[in-house]
């Protein structure tokens, strides 16, 4: 798997264990996952299945206890916190269910935020943020604050913020979870468009209809990842 030059994500024998009181919970149990560049993959599983832990490790927000994780050929397991943060900023755009926008900032200022950490000049930040808002169809709303936007528009601002740093990987955690069905369809259409333009998309969801839209589905259950739903594997 290490030799796969097209691997955007290569997880080899990854384990992650937590203590819940006196009980040891194995959130990820010796998983092997490979996702190629430009793929659109849905990771499907019920609450408590290990989805959040999987997302945190893929997103370099947490590191595994065992195993190796290669992101775009780089061995993440060996990086310290500062290098992990740099890798996150350069390679990954995050889209969350809760939007995570700062209410006091305009759409444009929210989208500019990750670029500050990259040390870009103010004019370059502005240019990339405006370009990202243009891509999600919100150029005319860039001075609006989140409270002046609908839920669907807020999620589009969040997608623009993810795009502004020009990442190769978009990690979307239940991106339609707080939206009505029409806004949800719009957001999924946008993710498809980004995928067609070259982004690798990893979508975390518990909704099988949403997962059906991906090119490939991975099922996560009790810390194990398979290509088939748990019930079908026994059939």
Image (cartoon, helix red, strand yellow):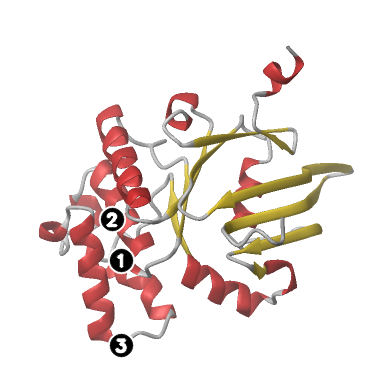
Q: Residue at x 38, y 79 (%)?
A: 116
Please identify the quarter of the rendering in which residue 233 is found.
top right
Along the horizontal axis of the image, is 224 left or right of 81?
Answer: right
User: Residue 49: horizontal and vertical position, in percent?
Assistant: 68, 35
**Tag 3–tag 1 contact (CB < 8 Å):** no
Question: Is residue 106 visible from the viewing direction of this image?
Answer: no
**Is the residue marked by circle 1 packed among few (<14), some (14-19), or many (20+) residues within 10 Å?**
many
- Residue 157, label in figure: 2
| Residue 104 against residue 221 in the figure, above or below | below
Q: Residue at x 37, y 49 (%)?
A: 195
- Residue 121, label in figure: 3
Badge 1 element: helix
| Residue 119 against residue 19 in the figure, above or below | below
Badge 3 element: loop
Q: Residue furthest left?
A: 140
Query: Marks 3 and 1, Cα distance to the nearest angstrom?
Result: 14 Å
């Amino acid at each position: 798997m290490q030799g796969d030059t097209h691997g955007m994500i290569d997880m080899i024998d990854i384990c992650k264990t937590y203590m819940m009181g006196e009980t040891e919970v194995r959130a990820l149990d010796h998983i092997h996952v490979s996702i190629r560049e430009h793929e659109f993959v849905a990771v499907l599983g019920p609450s408590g299945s290990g989805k959040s832990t999987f997302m945190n490790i893929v997103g370099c927000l947490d590191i595994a206890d065992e195993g190796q994780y290669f992101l775009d050929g780089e061995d993440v397991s060996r990086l310290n916190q500062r290098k992990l943060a740099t890798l996150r900023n350069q390679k990954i755009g995050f889209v969350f269910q809760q939007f995570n926008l700062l209410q006091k900032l305009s759409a444009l200022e929210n989208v500019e935020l990750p670029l500050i950490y990259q040390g870009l000049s103010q004019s370059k930040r502005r240019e990339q943020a405006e370009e990202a808002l243009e891509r999600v169809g919100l150029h005319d709303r860039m001075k609006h604050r989140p409270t002046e936007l609908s839920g669907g528009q807020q999620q589009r601002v969040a997608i623009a913020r993810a795009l502004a740093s020009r990442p190769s990987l978009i990690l979307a955690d239940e991106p339609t979870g707080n939206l009505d069905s029409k806004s949800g369809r719009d957001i999924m259409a946008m993710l498809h468009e980004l995928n067609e333009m070259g982004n690798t998309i990893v979508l975390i969801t518990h909704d099988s209809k949403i997962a059906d839209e991906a090119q490939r589905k991975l099922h996560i259950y009790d810390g194990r990842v398979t290509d088939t739903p748990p019930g079908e594997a026994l059939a």
